[in-house]
Amino acid sequence: MNTTYVIALTVALLVLLGIVIGLAIVGSRRSKKLQQRFGPEYDRIVQETGSQKAAEVELEQRRKHVENLNIRPLTKIEHDRYVEDWKAVQSRFVDDPSRTIKDADRLIIEVMLVRNYPMANFEERAADISVNYPELVSNYRAAHEIAQKNEQQTADTEELRQAMVHYRSLFNELLETEQTVAEMEKSK
């Protein structure tokens, strides 16, 4: 066998090996980045799809979709109004927990609408929320599940209380204002 041919083949194999290793490193970094960004939602989607690659494609599509939306923070006036609305909803819980859950769900949707989140269906709302609030999307899903049980009149008071806690955590995050966004930008 010709020495030049052996050297050329060895170099080609080394280049190919380098490319494979490089792609593996890039893929590993991408996976780690998505895991950090989406937290428990990453694991949920991997389990749901049965494939890490499929889950990562899904999460990347979510990220791109939300980037293309015109999600906006609330104005100070909107923020203050919704804080008061939430207080009113929450104050009715003891007297009418079932109605309060419906009102809390409605208020979450209203704030999302004002901020320009699309409202097609619950799963799409949850997917969109998962991009900016990955730690809270599981709370939103749990609250929604309890709200559905409430609609069927099968949720007990403790479940309804837990739904309110879940809704409140998401609601507080959705109250982001223009001022808080500006302050976050300054601190970067």
Image: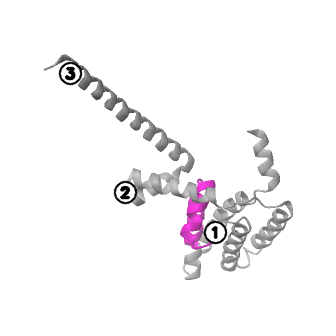
Predominant SS of the magenta segment:
helix
Amino acid, disc 1: Pro
Report helix, strand or loop for mark 1: loop
Q: Coloring scheme of the render?
A: one colour
C-alpha separation, residue under disc 2 versus residue under disc 3: 43 Å
C-alpha separation, residue under disc 1 versus residue under disc 3: 60 Å
**Quarter holding residue 176:** bottom right
Q: Measured from the top left, where is residue 59 in percent x and y?
A: 51, 55
Q: Is residue 172 visible?
A: yes
185, 90: nearer the viewer: 185
**Quarter holding residue 134:** bottom right
Amino acid, disc 3: Val
Residue at the (42%, 60%) spot, across then down: 48
For marks 1 and 2, the one nearer the N-term is: 2
Identify the magenta region. 119-146
The mark closer to the camera, 1 or 2, is 1
The mark closer to the camera, 1 or 3, is 3
The mark closer to the camera, 2 or 3, is 3
The residue at which mark 1 appears reads as 118
C-alpha separation, residue under disc 1 versus residue under disc 2: 27 Å
For marks 2 and 3, the one nearer the N-term is: 3
In the shown orientation, is residue 4 left or right of residue 98? left
The residue at which mark 3 appears reads as 6
The reply to whether callout 1 and callout 3 are in contact (CB within 8 Å) is no
Q: Does 141 lie within the magenta span? A: yes
Circle 3: is it few (<14), some (14-19), or many (20+) Cα within 10 Å? few
54, 164: nearer the viewer: 54
Query: If the image is split into quadrants, where does the N terminus sit?
Result: top left
151, 105: nearer the viewer: 105
Report helix, strand or loop for mark 3: helix
For marks 1 and 3, the one nearer the N-term is: 3
The residue at which mark 2 appears reads as 50
